[in-house]
Image: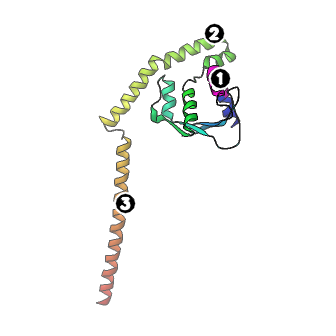
Amino acid sequence: MGIQIAAFNHLLNQHPAVRAELAAHAGRRIAVALPPLQVAGVLTDEGWLAACEGEPEATVRLKHAAALAAVAGRDPALNDVQFSGDAELATAVGRLLGRLQWNAAEDLSRLVGDTAAQRAETLARGLLGFKGQVAWRLAANWVEHLREETPVLASRRLVQGFIAEVDALRDDAGRLEKRLARLRAALQQEQTKA
């Protein structure tokens, strides 16, 4: 858990305003989960997250769609973020998490220098910026086309329906097999008597 807390605090280090707002909740235990990753701890007076014992008072669970939305520069859908525990604390932490963005150029500049980091950031923005959004939309439209227009990919609803039909067929076949076994036994009994 120490590595996750260190990574989370590194991200908080890039956002002093968010850290200051988190400090208002000092002493409260929180958890943030993006399966399979989870970070949990207690908020300090300086707004950092520190390791602690006990269950979190509030948990913010993010679905992977929320992370993809953040990368694409969009707000996540409401059903992509789940809150549990203390609703007020979870909502406040979730709102603050929405303001966190990793400044990769800052970290990269420590390794390769400011100029190379700036070039890498420009390249990444070009790939993930408008072009990335267009590519994301095209991919989403293509998947929708494969599901709806040419049924190469099945929607979740269709797959669940198919599974239910297969289960029903298996149960019916099992009942038929038992009925046939009883009829065979009855037929053998009749043949034995005759």
Boundaries of the magenta span = 9-24
On screen, residue 187 versus residue 102, left or right, reads left
Work out which quarter of the rendered image holds the C terminus and state it.
bottom left
Residue 51: where, in percent of width, then height? 71, 36
On screen, residue 83 versus residue 47, left or right, reads left
User: Above or below — where is 14 with respect to 151?
Assistant: above
**Distance of label 3 from label 1 (alpha carbons):** 59 Å
Q: Nearer the viewer, mark 2 or mark 1?
A: 1
User: Above or below — where is 79 with respect to 128?
Assistant: below
| Quadrant of res 39 | top right
Secondary structure beneath disc 1? helix
Label 3 crowd (10 A; few <14 / some 14-19 / many >=20): few
Task: Read off the residue under disc 2.
Answer: 115
Q: Amino acid at mark 2?
A: Thr
Task: Read off the residue under disc 3.
Answer: 170
Task: Read off the residue under disc 1.
Answer: 20
Q: Amino acid at mark 1?
A: Ala
| Quadrant of res 136 | top left
Residue 169: where, in percent of width, then height? 34, 59
Q: Residue at x 36, y 44 (%)?
A: 157
